[in-house]
Image: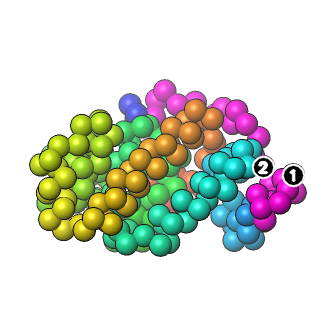
């Protein structure tokens, strides 16, 4: 087990129940039913469904960032993988391995996210996005980091990159606080390379 994951109790039960379309009402029930039909009823979403208003608005922002964003998915997934690693969010890391691969990241590039500053696997723009993400997480975004990323991202993409890092950092912290369990087959920090499509 990695240093990052050692303090996480992966055998624990979630602190809130996982909701289903059958034990919820209205729009929340409809959203969960659609997720169930698509096979996308992840534990984290089912846990969030305990709070109707938060769940509905969470889903709107999630769908906006995943499906209607101008930001290149590569940059989004680099930011997500980085905040997952920094937060020790094993579940979030595992869920996003497939997204990162679909966005064109190789397994060596995904691994390099953990210690990006010394990596030869990542290019200058990748490293600029990761520096930006780290500085946002540290609440000290410098003009230099902003301006470097602004050389290849426009204003809309800069906003989306900032929101994406913050959003998935919040998601990872929610997962840890509520002790969300990984679904069977969802990899973590130590076994993600073995997941489908890996090297």
Q: Are marks 2 and 1 in contact (CB under 8 Å)?
A: yes
Q: Is residue 24 magenta?
A: yes
Left or right of residue 125: residue 23: right
Q: Please, which colouring scheme is shown?
A: rainbow
Measured from the top left, where is residue 189 in percent x and y? 44, 45
Q: Is residue 137 above or below residue 103?
A: above
Q: Is residue 6 magenta?
A: yes
Query: Residue at 49% of width from left, 43% of height from top?
Result: 170
Return the residue found at the far front. 155
Picture layout, residue 27 above or below residue 141: below
- What span is colored magenta in the figure? 5-30
Q: Who is closer to the viewer here, 116 or 70?
A: 70
Q: Which residue is mark 1?
A: 23
Residue at the disc numbered 2:
19
Q: Is residue 167 above or below residue 29?
A: above
Question: Does dot 2 land on a helix, a strand or a loop?
Answer: loop
Q: Please name whichever residue, 172 or 163, is drawn nearer the observer in this view of the structure.
A: 163
Q: Quadrant of the N terminus?
A: top left
């Amino acid at each position: 087990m990695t240093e990052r994951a050692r303090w996480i109790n992966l055998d624990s039960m979630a602190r809130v129940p996982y909701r289903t379309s059958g034990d919820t009402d209205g729009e929340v029930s409809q959203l969960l039913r659609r997720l169930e039909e698509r096979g996308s009823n992840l534990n984290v979403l089912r846990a969030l469904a305990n709070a109707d208003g938060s769940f509905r608005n969470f889903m709107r922002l999630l769908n906006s960032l995943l499906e209607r964003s101008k930001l290149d998915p590569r940059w989004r997934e680099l930011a997500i993988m980085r905040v997952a690693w920094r937060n020790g969010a094993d579940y979030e890391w595992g869920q996003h391995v497939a997204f990162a691969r679909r966005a064109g990241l190789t397994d060596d590039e995904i691994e390099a996210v953990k210690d990006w500053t010394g990596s030869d696997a990542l290019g200058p723009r990748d490293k600029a996005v990761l520096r930006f993400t780290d500085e946002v997480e540290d609440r000290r975004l410098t003009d230099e980091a902003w301006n470097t990323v602004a050389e290849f991202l426009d204003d809309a993409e800069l906003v989306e990159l900032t929101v994406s890092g913050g959003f998935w950092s919040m998601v990872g912290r929610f997962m840890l606080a509520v002790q969300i369990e990984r679904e069977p087959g969802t990899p973590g920090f130590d076994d993600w390379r073995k997941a489908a499509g890996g090297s």
